[in-house]
Amino acid sequence: MVELWLLLVVFGGSLFALIFQGVAIVLALDMPNLGPAPAAGPNALPTVSVVIAARNEERDLPGCLDDLLAQDYPNLEIVVVDGASTDRTGEVAKARARRVRLVEESPVPDGWVGKNWACEIGSRETRGEWILFTDADLRYHPTAVRATVEWAEREHADLATLAPRIVAAGFWERVVMPFYAQMVLTYFRTPRVNRATSKAAMANGQYTLVRRGPYERLGGHRAIRSSVLEDVRLALLYRKAGLTLRVAWAPDLISTEMYRDRSEMFEGLLKNVHGLRFSAARQAAFLAGLVAFFWLPLAVLPVALLWGSPILALWGAVLYLALFGKHVAFARGLRLNAWYGLAFPIAVGYYAVLVATSVGRGIRGRSVVWKGRAYPLER
């Protein structure tokens, strides 16, 4: 017979893990959803400057620019900053030169991350009351810019950011992206960003709209020049300055295929997990949390059957239904087949490999590499 204290420990620990995982559902339900804007009214719209930091984006940039050129927004300025591309990125922008301005990036100064330097250059070249920093791998509904600006002005926001629908093409992307969405929601407490009394702060660098005045007063991207996670650092600057942040999910306004293949996804997610300020203790705690909160609860049912404990087996079955059901719901929320939600233990393993790789690289002092550029670690 299994000792009562052992049953209580297993039950208590797995219940805590279940509650922790439930936080992602609460946050997802609390996330505002921004949809396409209704027909434009007679009100005058402020000028908006779009800045695209583009490095080797010849595949994605044509669709991005064509969608932006099709926006129902009259006062739209589009600037592409070519970050020393070795492909046809510059030619793609030049082919639309009548409405798109191409700026060649000067050499990246010491201490700067390439994207931050491109955004800084681009912002200096623009004149709009609002600046929209966006990526080449996004696709836009024709009302995306107007819907975002009107929403930001209604909310009196100084920074407004949107989360896109993620287009996952390959098996690994479809398995990992629902789990990735949960990690972002839980870690950043994303919808809490909209509360003035909250300390939560985050932005999505793929699509971030800022008022020019506050952005320039805070120092622009110069103030966050060395950060790989520039969007989060920018949001933290705004939060600390007491400015207004707004975030929403907008699957019908913008979409993105974040990564082209499994290798690019691994390096991209590793960059986000790793950052430039490496801490082996923090990463080890992250790895332990993945195992404790996502894998160990799945062991309750087989262990209960091994012990011959009907009560614990029933609880293990409840855990399976709740946890797999939750991950299926997230997969469906991202408009993926429900079967990919059932593969969430594989996604947890993928993240565990990411974190273990991060620890190994950090201990060896290896630089963070992204878009062909290497950035040294800070300890």
Image (cartoon, grey):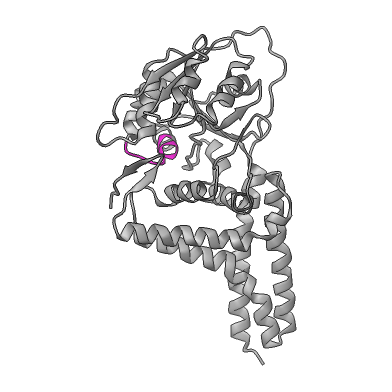
- Residue 194 pos. (x, y %): 55, 36
- Residue that lies at the very extreme toward the bottom in this rendered image: 1
Q: In the image shown, does 234 or 255 lie closer to the viewer? A: 255
The answer, for residue 130, to whether it is visible in the render is no
**Picture layout, residue 90 above or below residue 299:** above
- Residue 181 pos. (x, y %): 59, 48
- Residue 28 pos. (x, y %): 64, 46
The answer, for residue 29, to whether it is visible in the render is yes
Q: Which residue corresponds to the image point at 26% horizontal and 37% vertical from the top-left?
A: 111
- Residue that lies at the very extreme toward the front in this rendered image: 87
Is 206 on the left or on the right of 219, as rendered?
right
Q: Which residue corresponds to the image point at 30% horizontal and 24% vertical from the top-left?
A: 106
**Picture layout, residue 1 above or below residue 111:** below
Image quarter of residue 126: top left
Q: In the image shown, does 242 or 227 lie closer to the viewer? A: 227
Q: Magenta part of the protein: which range?
A: 226-234
Q: In the image shown, does 359 or 35 lie closer to the viewer? A: 359
Q: In the image shown, does 317 or 334 lie closer to the viewer? A: 334
Q: Which residue corresponds to the image point at 59% horizontal and 26% vertical from the top-left?
A: 63
